[in-house]
Image (tube, rainbow, N blue to C red):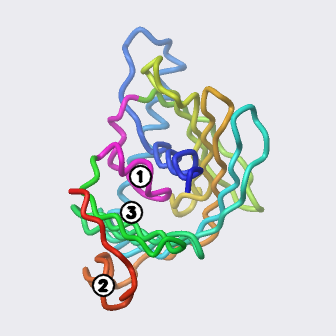
Amino acid sequence: MKNFKTIFPTVLAWAFVLVTAMQTSSTAQDRNQALQVLQQASQTYAQAGGVDASFHIRTIEPGGQEGAEISGSILLKGNKFKLVIPDEMITWFDGRNQWLYILAAEEVNLSNPTEEELLMINPVNVFQLWQHGFRCRYDGEKTLNGKTVIQVSLEPEDPQSDVRSLTVAFDKATRQPRHITVTNKDRSGSVIDITKYQPRQDYADQLFVFAQKEYPTATVIDLR
């Protein structure tokens, strides 16, 4: 579980704020193109309904050493989600309450996470957090796994941030996320490939709530 704080800050890759007018015109053009891509991706998600996504994460330890590789899946509906890392954890979030089920301990931690804490959890969504203090640059079109993607890079404005840089690649045709990379100051980070992204799914709200009857031996610890 200790690697998750390294893994899930990658969702910050959708963060963006307008930078100062002191930049050069070429930088301003890159900024505007990047903002346009992020806004299009946000609109695409808003119109997607429920989303069924799978991802593969390659972690990088401090110093740049290769870390663990993890695959998982996430179901999304608006600001709700259910995140599954097989044999490790399941997280439900109903828009306010979060249940984190640690399988090995048969323990569920119930909390009301802050917006910042949610950034650590959901590796696919959070398009609306473009105002969270990152400079943005348009990197242009690239080829990824035989498909054309549009890449955006971000750097934090806060010099105290642990994050050094992030990149996000969106499918050019659909504006769906395909690849996310985060690099921290200590050279740790993670690389996420979105291996499946299926929109227009119909999910009941109860899917995003922990059901005690399905996990009768789990102990719930209320941290709210």
Sequence-first tag of 1 and 3: 1
Q: Is mark 1 on a helix, strand or loop?
A: helix
Note whether 36 is above or below 89 in the view shown.
Answer: above
Q: In which quarter of the image is the N terminus?
A: bottom right
Q: Which residue occupies 46% across, 26% down?
A: 135
Q: Which residue is labeled 1 in the image?
A: 40
Label 2 belongs to which residue?
A: 212
Foreground label between 1 and 3: 3
Q: What element carries label 2?
A: helix
Please give the label number shown on residue 45.
3
Specify the amino acid type for callout 1: Gln
CB under 8 Å between discs 2 and 3: no
State left or right for residue 24 relative to residue 189.
left
Mark 2 in CB contact with mark 1 (< 8 angstroms): no
Quote the CA–CA distance across marks 2 and 1. Answer: 39 Å
Quadrant for residue 97, please give it. bottom left
Disc 2 crowd, CA 10 A, few/some/many (<14, 14-19, 20+): few
Q: Where is residue 131 in the image (x, y as percent from the top left)?
A: 32, 35
The answer to which of 146 and 59 lies nearer the viewer is 59
The local crowd at label 1, few if under 14, some if 14 to 19, many if 20 or more residues have their Cα within 10 Å, is: some
Tell me the magenta residue range: 115-133
Kindly report the distance in space between the C-alpha atoms of the residues bearing marks 1 and 3: 9 Å
Q: How far apart are marks 2 and 3 (CA)?
A: 30 Å
Check if residue 29 falls in the magenta segment.
no
Report whether 63 appears left or right of 78. right
Residue at image x 42%, y 20%? 158
The residue that appears at 62% across and 54% down in the rendered structure is 179
Can you give x and y, in whole percent of width and height, for residue 73 in the image? 54, 72
Residue lying at 64% horizontally and 41% vertically, measured from the top left: 189
Q: What residue type is labelled 2?
A: Gln
Q: Earlier in the sequence, mark 2 or mark 1?
A: 1
